[in-house]
Amino acid sequence: MSVRLWHAVLAASVALAPVAVSAQSVAPAGPSPAVISMREQWLNPAINSFTFRDTDKVFESRAVPRSGPISPLAAGPALAMPQHQSAAAGAMGYGAWADRTFTNALLVLKDGKIVFEDYRNKSDAATHFISFSMAKTITALLIGIALHEGKIRSLDDKVGDYVPELKAGGYGDATIRQIMQMRSGVDYEERYDFGEHPSLAAMIHMKAIVRNQMRFADPAVTIGKKTAPGSTFNYATLDTAVLGWILERATGEKLESYTASRLWGPLGAEAGAFWLADGPPGTGRALNGMGYNAVLRDFGRIGQMMLDGGKVNGSQVIPAGWVSQMTTMIPFPAGSGRKTEFKGYGFQTWQVDSEPGAFSAVGLAGQFIYVHPQTHTVIVKLSYNPPVEPEWLTPEVLDYFHAIVRAPVKP
Protein backbone atom coordinates (compact mmCIF):
# COMPACT_ATOMS: atom_id res chain seq x y z
CA MET A 1 0.00 0.00 0.00
CA SER A 2 1.05 3.64 -0.32
CA VAL A 3 2.82 4.18 2.98
CA ARG A 4 4.80 0.95 2.82
CA LEU A 5 5.89 1.55 -0.75
CA TRP A 6 6.89 5.18 -0.22
CA HIS A 7 8.91 4.21 2.85
CA ALA A 8 11.37 2.48 0.56
CA VAL A 9 12.36 5.85 -0.90
CA LEU A 10 12.66 7.36 2.55
CA ALA A 11 14.93 4.64 3.86
CA ALA A 12 17.10 4.80 0.78
CA SER A 13 17.29 8.57 0.38
CA VAL A 14 18.07 9.24 4.04
CA ALA A 15 20.90 6.71 3.95
CA LEU A 16 22.46 8.24 0.85
CA ALA A 17 24.96 11.07 0.97
CA PRO A 18 23.80 14.23 -0.77
CA VAL A 19 24.07 13.93 -4.55
CA ALA A 20 26.89 15.97 -6.03
CA VAL A 21 25.51 18.55 -8.44
CA SER A 22 27.56 20.34 -11.05
CA ALA A 23 26.61 23.61 -12.70
CA GLN A 24 26.03 21.73 -15.93
CA SER A 25 23.54 19.28 -14.37
CA VAL A 26 21.04 21.93 -13.28
CA ALA A 27 19.05 23.98 -15.75
CA PRO A 28 19.77 27.72 -15.48
CA ALA A 29 16.30 28.42 -14.08
CA GLY A 30 16.30 25.36 -11.84
CA PRO A 31 17.00 25.00 -8.13
CA SER A 32 20.45 25.82 -6.79
CA PRO A 33 22.72 23.12 -5.30
CA ALA A 34 21.83 24.38 -1.82
CA VAL A 35 18.11 24.02 -2.50
CA ILE A 36 18.63 20.54 -3.91
CA SER A 37 20.55 19.55 -0.79
CA MET A 38 17.73 20.80 1.40
CA ARG A 39 15.14 18.94 -0.68
CA GLU A 40 17.12 15.73 -0.29
CA GLN A 41 16.70 16.09 3.49
CA TRP A 42 12.91 16.50 3.24
CA LEU A 43 12.21 13.00 4.50
CA ASN A 44 15.00 12.87 7.08
CA PRO A 45 13.41 11.59 10.34
CA ALA A 46 15.59 13.87 12.43
CA ILE A 47 13.85 16.95 11.02
CA ASN A 48 10.70 15.81 9.20
CA SER A 49 8.39 17.08 11.95
CA PHE A 50 9.38 20.51 10.56
CA THR A 51 10.14 19.80 6.89
CA PHE A 52 6.61 18.49 6.35
CA ARG A 53 5.29 22.05 6.83
CA ASP A 54 5.29 25.16 4.67
CA THR A 55 6.95 23.21 1.87
CA ASP A 56 6.44 26.02 -0.64
CA LYS A 57 9.51 27.64 0.90
CA VAL A 58 11.67 24.79 -0.42
CA PHE A 59 9.83 23.32 -3.44
CA GLU A 60 8.11 24.74 -6.48
CA SER A 61 4.42 25.35 -5.76
CA ARG A 62 1.14 26.53 -7.26
CA ALA A 63 -1.16 28.64 -5.09
CA VAL A 64 -4.81 27.66 -4.47
CA PRO A 65 -6.38 30.82 -3.00
CA ARG A 66 -9.47 30.70 -0.84
CA SER A 67 -12.53 32.76 -1.73
CA GLY A 68 -16.03 33.49 -0.50
CA PRO A 69 -17.50 32.90 2.96
CA ILE A 70 -15.64 30.66 5.36
CA SER A 71 -17.63 27.57 6.26
CA PRO A 72 -17.99 27.66 10.04
CA LEU A 73 -16.57 24.92 12.22
CA ALA A 74 -18.26 25.62 15.52
CA ALA A 75 -16.87 24.40 18.80
CA GLY A 76 -18.78 21.44 20.18
CA PRO A 77 -18.68 19.92 23.65
CA ALA A 78 -15.16 18.82 24.53
CA LEU A 79 -14.28 15.22 23.80
CA ALA A 80 -13.01 13.08 26.66
CA MET A 81 -9.91 11.81 24.91
CA PRO A 82 -9.49 8.13 25.73
CA GLN A 83 -6.60 6.29 27.28
CA HIS A 84 -4.50 4.16 24.96
CA GLN A 85 -3.26 0.71 25.88
CA SER A 86 -0.10 -0.45 24.14
CA ALA A 87 1.19 -3.97 24.53
CA ALA A 88 4.74 -2.67 24.46
CA ALA A 89 4.40 0.65 26.27
CA GLY A 90 1.46 0.13 28.62
CA ALA A 91 -1.34 2.59 29.35
CA MET A 92 -1.01 6.21 28.34
CA GLY A 93 -3.08 9.35 27.87
CA TYR A 94 -3.51 11.31 24.68
CA GLY A 95 -0.27 13.32 25.03
CA ALA A 96 1.91 10.26 25.35
CA TRP A 97 0.07 8.53 22.50
CA ALA A 98 0.52 11.61 20.28
CA ASP A 99 4.26 11.66 20.91
CA ARG A 100 4.53 7.88 20.47
CA THR A 101 2.74 8.06 17.10
CA PHE A 102 4.69 11.06 15.74
CA THR A 103 1.77 13.48 15.74
CA ASN A 104 2.12 17.07 14.54
CA ALA A 105 -1.56 17.97 14.74
CA LEU A 106 -4.89 16.27 15.43
CA LEU A 107 -8.47 17.37 14.84
CA VAL A 108 -11.69 15.58 15.78
CA LEU A 109 -15.08 16.65 14.43
CA LYS A 110 -18.33 15.19 15.69
CA ASP A 111 -21.59 16.21 14.02
CA GLY A 112 -19.60 18.85 12.15
CA LYS A 113 -18.27 20.52 15.31
CA ILE A 114 -14.75 20.68 16.68
CA VAL A 115 -14.58 18.57 19.82
CA PHE A 116 -10.79 18.28 19.98
CA GLU A 117 -7.93 20.17 18.33
CA ASP A 118 -4.24 19.93 19.10
CA TYR A 119 -1.10 21.42 17.54
CA ARG A 120 2.32 20.14 18.50
CA ASN A 121 5.99 20.76 17.80
CA LYS A 122 5.58 24.53 17.33
CA SER A 123 2.83 24.20 14.74
CA ASP A 124 -0.43 26.16 14.96
CA ALA A 125 -3.73 26.78 13.19
CA ALA A 126 -1.98 28.76 10.41
CA THR A 127 0.56 26.03 9.61
CA HIS A 128 0.28 24.45 6.17
CA PHE A 129 0.97 20.72 6.34
CA ILE A 130 1.88 18.43 3.45
CA SER A 131 -0.84 15.88 2.61
CA PHE A 132 1.38 13.47 0.70
CA SER A 133 -0.94 10.88 -0.85
CA MET A 134 -4.10 12.27 0.74
CA ALA A 135 -3.84 14.42 -2.39
CA LYS A 136 -4.99 11.39 -4.37
CA THR A 137 -8.39 11.55 -2.69
CA ILE A 138 -8.59 15.26 -3.48
CA THR A 139 -7.82 14.41 -7.11
CA ALA A 140 -10.72 11.95 -7.12
CA LEU A 141 -13.05 14.68 -5.83
CA LEU A 142 -11.98 16.89 -8.75
CA ILE A 143 -12.55 14.06 -11.24
CA GLY A 144 -16.11 13.75 -9.93
CA ILE A 145 -16.72 17.47 -10.45
CA ALA A 146 -15.32 17.37 -14.01
CA LEU A 147 -17.50 14.34 -14.77
CA HIS A 148 -20.60 16.14 -13.50
CA GLU A 149 -19.74 19.20 -15.60
CA GLY A 150 -19.43 17.06 -18.72
CA LYS A 151 -15.74 17.94 -19.11
CA ILE A 152 -15.07 14.22 -18.68
CA ARG A 153 -17.72 12.31 -20.61
CA SER A 154 -17.41 8.91 -18.93
CA LEU A 155 -15.15 7.09 -16.50
CA ASP A 156 -14.98 4.35 -19.10
CA ASP A 157 -13.31 6.62 -21.66
CA LYS A 158 -9.74 5.73 -22.55
CA VAL A 159 -7.08 8.04 -21.18
CA GLY A 160 -5.85 8.69 -24.71
CA ASP A 161 -9.18 10.32 -25.51
CA TYR A 162 -8.03 13.24 -23.35
CA VAL A 163 -4.23 12.96 -23.56
CA PRO A 164 -3.35 11.66 -27.04
CA GLU A 165 0.32 11.38 -26.06
CA LEU A 166 -0.64 8.36 -23.92
CA LYS A 167 -2.28 6.31 -26.68
CA ALA A 168 0.83 4.44 -27.79
CA GLY A 169 2.22 3.39 -24.42
CA GLY A 170 1.12 1.16 -21.57
CA TYR A 171 -1.72 3.50 -20.66
CA GLY A 172 -3.24 3.24 -24.14
CA ASP A 173 -5.92 0.68 -23.27
CA ALA A 174 -6.62 1.84 -19.72
CA THR A 175 -9.80 3.70 -18.78
CA ILE A 176 -10.15 6.54 -16.32
CA ARG A 177 -12.09 4.20 -14.02
CA GLN A 178 -9.26 1.65 -14.01
CA ILE A 179 -6.72 4.33 -13.18
CA MET A 180 -8.95 5.65 -10.39
CA GLN A 181 -8.89 2.14 -8.92
CA MET A 182 -5.09 1.80 -9.32
CA ARG A 183 -5.61 -0.93 -11.92
CA SER A 184 -4.02 0.66 -14.99
CA GLY A 185 -1.91 -2.41 -15.77
CA VAL A 186 1.24 -0.42 -16.57
CA ASP A 187 4.69 -1.71 -15.75
CA TYR A 188 5.39 0.54 -12.78
CA GLU A 189 6.48 -0.36 -9.27
CA GLU A 190 6.25 2.09 -6.39
CA ARG A 191 9.74 1.09 -5.33
CA TYR A 192 12.45 3.63 -4.67
CA ASP A 193 15.95 2.32 -5.33
CA PHE A 194 18.56 5.04 -5.66
CA GLY A 195 22.22 4.71 -6.57
CA GLU A 196 23.90 4.04 -9.90
CA HIS A 197 20.89 2.26 -11.38
CA PRO A 198 17.81 3.95 -9.88
CA SER A 199 14.35 2.51 -10.28
CA LEU A 200 11.84 4.42 -12.40
CA ALA A 201 10.05 5.72 -9.31
CA ALA A 202 13.33 6.93 -7.79
CA MET A 203 14.32 8.62 -11.05
CA ILE A 204 10.97 10.43 -11.25
CA HIS A 205 11.27 11.54 -7.62
CA MET A 206 14.74 13.03 -8.14
CA LYS A 207 14.24 14.58 -11.56
CA ALA A 208 10.67 15.85 -11.20
CA ILE A 209 10.40 16.85 -7.55
CA VAL A 210 13.93 17.44 -6.27
CA ARG A 211 15.65 18.88 -9.36
CA ASN A 212 12.66 20.09 -11.41
CA GLN A 213 14.13 18.73 -14.64
CA MET A 214 11.02 16.92 -15.88
CA ARG A 215 7.33 16.49 -15.22
CA PHE A 216 6.18 13.67 -12.97
CA ALA A 217 3.85 12.26 -15.63
CA ASP A 218 6.34 12.37 -18.54
CA PRO A 219 7.36 8.68 -18.23
CA ALA A 220 3.69 7.70 -18.67
CA VAL A 221 4.10 8.39 -22.39
CA THR A 222 6.59 5.56 -22.96
CA ILE A 223 5.93 3.16 -20.09
CA GLY A 224 5.04 -0.41 -21.02
CA LYS A 225 2.20 -2.67 -19.95
CA LYS A 226 2.51 -5.44 -17.36
CA THR A 227 -1.03 -6.76 -16.86
CA ALA A 228 -4.41 -6.34 -18.49
CA PRO A 229 -6.03 -3.05 -17.43
CA GLY A 230 -8.51 -3.60 -14.62
CA SER A 231 -7.14 -6.99 -13.61
CA THR A 232 -4.66 -6.20 -10.83
CA PHE A 233 -4.36 -3.60 -8.08
CA ASN A 234 -0.99 -1.89 -8.27
CA TYR A 235 -0.57 1.27 -6.22
CA ALA A 236 1.11 3.83 -8.47
CA THR A 237 1.50 7.55 -7.93
CA LEU A 238 2.14 7.72 -11.67
CA ASP A 239 -1.51 6.70 -12.21
CA THR A 240 -2.68 9.70 -10.19
CA ALA A 241 -0.32 12.00 -12.08
CA VAL A 242 -2.02 10.81 -15.27
CA LEU A 243 -5.40 11.71 -13.72
CA GLY A 244 -4.08 15.23 -13.13
CA TRP A 245 -2.98 15.44 -16.75
CA ILE A 246 -6.44 14.30 -17.86
CA LEU A 247 -8.07 16.93 -15.64
CA GLU A 248 -6.03 19.74 -17.12
CA ARG A 249 -6.70 18.64 -20.69
CA ALA A 250 -10.41 17.98 -20.09
CA THR A 251 -11.10 21.25 -18.26
CA GLY A 252 -8.70 23.48 -20.14
CA GLU A 253 -7.48 24.83 -16.79
CA LYS A 254 -4.41 24.50 -14.65
CA LEU A 255 -5.12 22.17 -11.76
CA GLU A 256 -4.55 24.88 -9.17
CA SER A 257 -7.15 27.11 -10.84
CA TYR A 258 -9.70 24.31 -11.10
CA THR A 259 -9.09 23.32 -7.48
CA ALA A 260 -9.61 26.89 -6.30
CA SER A 261 -12.83 27.58 -8.21
CA ARG A 262 -14.55 24.20 -7.98
CA LEU A 263 -13.41 22.85 -4.61
CA TRP A 264 -11.54 25.25 -2.33
CA GLY A 265 -13.86 28.22 -2.66
CA PRO A 266 -17.12 26.23 -2.45
CA LEU A 267 -15.68 24.22 0.46
CA GLY A 268 -15.49 27.44 2.48
CA ALA A 269 -11.82 26.93 3.30
CA GLU A 270 -10.47 29.32 5.90
CA ALA A 271 -6.99 29.58 4.37
CA GLY A 272 -5.37 29.39 0.98
CA ALA A 273 -3.66 26.15 0.05
CA PHE A 274 -1.07 25.11 -2.52
CA TRP A 275 0.04 22.24 -4.69
CA LEU A 276 3.72 21.39 -4.93
CA ALA A 277 4.82 21.42 -8.56
CA ASP A 278 7.17 19.47 -10.80
CA GLY A 279 9.16 20.42 -13.88
CA PRO A 280 11.14 23.53 -14.66
CA PRO A 281 9.88 26.62 -12.79
CA GLY A 282 6.96 28.18 -14.59
CA THR A 283 6.25 25.21 -16.83
CA GLY A 284 5.63 22.32 -14.44
CA ARG A 285 2.35 20.79 -13.35
CA ALA A 286 0.78 20.50 -9.90
CA LEU A 287 1.90 17.33 -8.11
CA ASN A 288 -1.61 16.02 -7.66
CA GLY A 289 -0.48 12.57 -6.53
CA MET A 290 1.23 13.74 -3.35
CA GLY A 291 1.61 17.50 -3.15
CA TYR A 292 -1.40 19.25 -1.61
CA ASN A 293 -0.76 21.49 1.40
CA ALA A 294 -3.40 23.00 3.69
CA VAL A 295 -4.13 23.92 7.30
CA LEU A 296 -5.50 21.31 9.68
CA ARG A 297 -9.07 22.61 9.84
CA ASP A 298 -9.37 22.72 6.05
CA PHE A 299 -8.36 19.08 5.83
CA GLY A 300 -11.13 18.56 8.38
CA ARG A 301 -13.57 20.40 6.13
CA ILE A 302 -12.73 17.97 3.31
CA GLY A 303 -13.52 15.02 5.57
CA GLN A 304 -16.75 16.62 6.81
CA MET A 305 -17.86 17.37 3.25
CA MET A 306 -17.29 13.73 2.31
CA LEU A 307 -19.15 12.57 5.43
CA ASP A 308 -22.05 14.81 4.36
CA GLY A 309 -22.22 13.25 0.90
CA GLY A 310 -20.43 16.13 -0.83
CA LYS A 311 -22.46 18.93 0.77
CA VAL A 312 -21.21 22.04 2.57
CA ASN A 313 -23.79 24.01 4.55
CA GLY A 314 -26.52 22.27 2.57
CA SER A 315 -25.03 23.09 -0.85
CA GLN A 316 -23.86 20.27 -3.09
CA VAL A 317 -20.16 20.94 -3.75
CA ILE A 318 -19.27 17.41 -4.85
CA PRO A 319 -21.88 15.85 -7.17
CA ALA A 320 -24.54 13.80 -5.38
CA GLY A 321 -23.55 10.15 -5.22
CA TRP A 322 -19.90 10.72 -6.11
CA VAL A 323 -18.52 10.21 -2.60
CA SER A 324 -20.47 6.95 -2.44
CA GLN A 325 -18.81 5.85 -5.69
CA MET A 326 -15.37 6.87 -4.44
CA THR A 327 -15.79 4.90 -1.23
CA THR A 328 -17.21 1.72 -2.76
CA MET A 329 -14.22 -0.48 -2.05
CA ILE A 330 -12.76 -3.39 -3.96
CA PRO A 331 -11.55 -5.71 -1.19
CA PHE A 332 -8.01 -6.98 -1.21
CA PRO A 333 -7.84 -10.78 -1.47
CA ALA A 334 -6.47 -12.78 1.42
CA GLY A 335 -2.74 -13.23 1.16
CA SER A 336 -2.29 -10.09 -0.94
CA GLY A 337 0.76 -9.13 1.11
CA ARG A 338 -0.73 -5.85 2.30
CA LYS A 339 -0.97 -4.78 5.91
CA THR A 340 -3.88 -6.64 7.44
CA GLU A 341 -5.48 -3.40 8.62
CA PHE A 342 -5.84 -2.18 5.02
CA LYS A 343 -8.88 -3.94 3.61
CA GLY A 344 -9.65 -2.38 0.24
CA TYR A 345 -9.43 0.48 -2.21
CA GLY A 346 -12.03 2.57 -4.02
CA PHE A 347 -11.41 5.63 -6.17
CA GLN A 348 -8.10 6.96 -4.78
CA THR A 349 -9.48 6.29 -1.28
CA TRP A 350 -8.69 3.56 1.26
CA GLN A 351 -10.63 1.20 3.50
CA VAL A 352 -8.24 0.99 6.43
CA ASP A 353 -10.27 -1.15 8.83
CA SER A 354 -13.43 -3.21 9.19
CA GLU A 355 -15.57 -0.42 10.63
CA PRO A 356 -18.80 -0.39 8.57
CA GLY A 357 -18.74 2.40 6.01
CA ALA A 358 -15.52 3.97 7.27
CA PHE A 359 -13.02 5.29 4.73
CA SER A 360 -9.83 7.31 4.69
CA ALA A 361 -7.51 9.47 2.70
CA VAL A 362 -4.03 8.21 3.55
CA GLY A 363 -0.65 9.84 3.02
CA LEU A 364 2.96 8.92 3.50
CA ALA A 365 4.37 9.19 7.02
CA GLY A 366 1.06 8.96 8.84
CA GLN A 367 -1.29 11.48 7.23
CA PHE A 368 -4.97 10.57 7.68
CA ILE A 369 -8.40 12.00 7.04
CA TYR A 370 -10.45 9.25 8.66
CA VAL A 371 -14.24 9.34 8.24
CA HIS A 372 -16.51 7.22 10.44
CA PRO A 373 -20.11 7.66 9.27
CA GLN A 374 -21.73 5.56 12.02
CA THR A 375 -20.66 8.05 14.70
CA HIS A 376 -20.60 11.16 12.46
CA THR A 377 -16.90 11.54 13.23
CA VAL A 378 -13.98 12.91 11.22
CA ILE A 379 -10.41 12.57 12.47
CA VAL A 380 -7.47 14.32 10.85
CA LYS A 381 -4.02 13.21 11.95
CA LEU A 382 -0.94 14.95 10.51
CA SER A 383 2.25 13.14 11.35
CA TYR A 384 5.98 12.74 10.84
CA ASN A 385 6.47 8.98 10.88
CA PRO A 386 10.03 7.72 10.40
CA PRO A 387 11.10 6.29 7.03
CA VAL A 388 10.84 2.71 8.24
CA GLU A 389 7.70 2.50 10.33
CA PRO A 390 7.59 0.22 13.36
CA GLU A 391 5.15 -2.63 12.77
CA TRP A 392 3.03 -1.52 15.72
CA LEU A 393 2.55 2.05 14.51
CA THR A 394 -0.40 1.97 12.11
CA PRO A 395 -2.36 -0.61 14.16
CA GLU A 396 -1.99 1.55 17.27
CA VAL A 397 -3.09 4.65 15.38
CA LEU A 398 -6.20 2.89 14.09
CA ASP A 399 -6.94 1.41 17.52
CA TYR A 400 -6.92 4.91 18.97
CA PHE A 401 -9.13 6.21 16.15
CA HIS A 402 -11.63 3.51 17.08
CA ALA A 403 -11.48 4.59 20.72
CA ILE A 404 -11.95 8.25 19.73
CA VAL A 405 -15.09 7.63 17.67
CA ARG A 406 -16.69 5.93 20.68
CA ALA A 407 -15.42 8.29 23.35
CA PRO A 408 -18.04 10.41 25.15
CA VAL A 409 -18.15 14.17 24.94
CA LYS A 410 -17.99 16.03 28.21
CA PRO A 411 -21.34 17.37 29.48
Image (cartoon, rainbow, N blue to C red):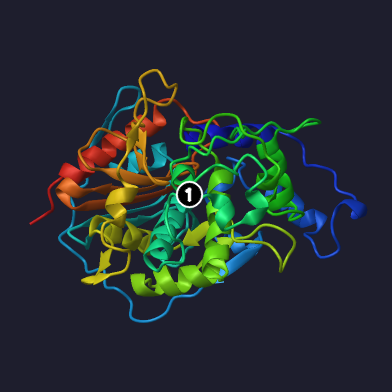
Q: Residue 39 vs residue 319: left or right?
A: right
Q: Residue 395 vs residue 73: left or right?
A: right
Report which residue position mark 1 lands on.
176
Which residue, as the protein is rendered here, is positioned at the far bottom?
68
Label 1, residues with CA under 10 Å away: few <14, some 14-19, many ≥20: many
Q: Reply above or below: 371 against 200.
A: below
Image quarter where the C terminus lies is bottom left
Q: Is residue 203 visible?
A: yes
Choose top left, top right, bottom left or bottom right for residue 346. top left
Q: Position of residue 113 (x, y in %)?
A: 21, 63
Identity, as a three-letter code, of the amino acid under mark 1 = Ile
Q: Position of residue 235 (x, y in %)?
A: 50, 36
Choose top left, top right, bottom left or bottom right for residue 268. bottom left
Q: Is residue 290 visible?
A: no
Q: Residue 132 vs residue 405: left or right?
A: right
Q: Reply above or below: 213 against 295.
A: above
User: Residue sitting at 55 percent across and 45 percent down?
Assistant: 239
Give the tally of numbered discs. 1
Numbered disc 1: secondary structure = helix
Q: Residue 145 vs residue 31: left or right?
A: left
Q: Nearer the viewer, residue 158 or 18?
A: 158
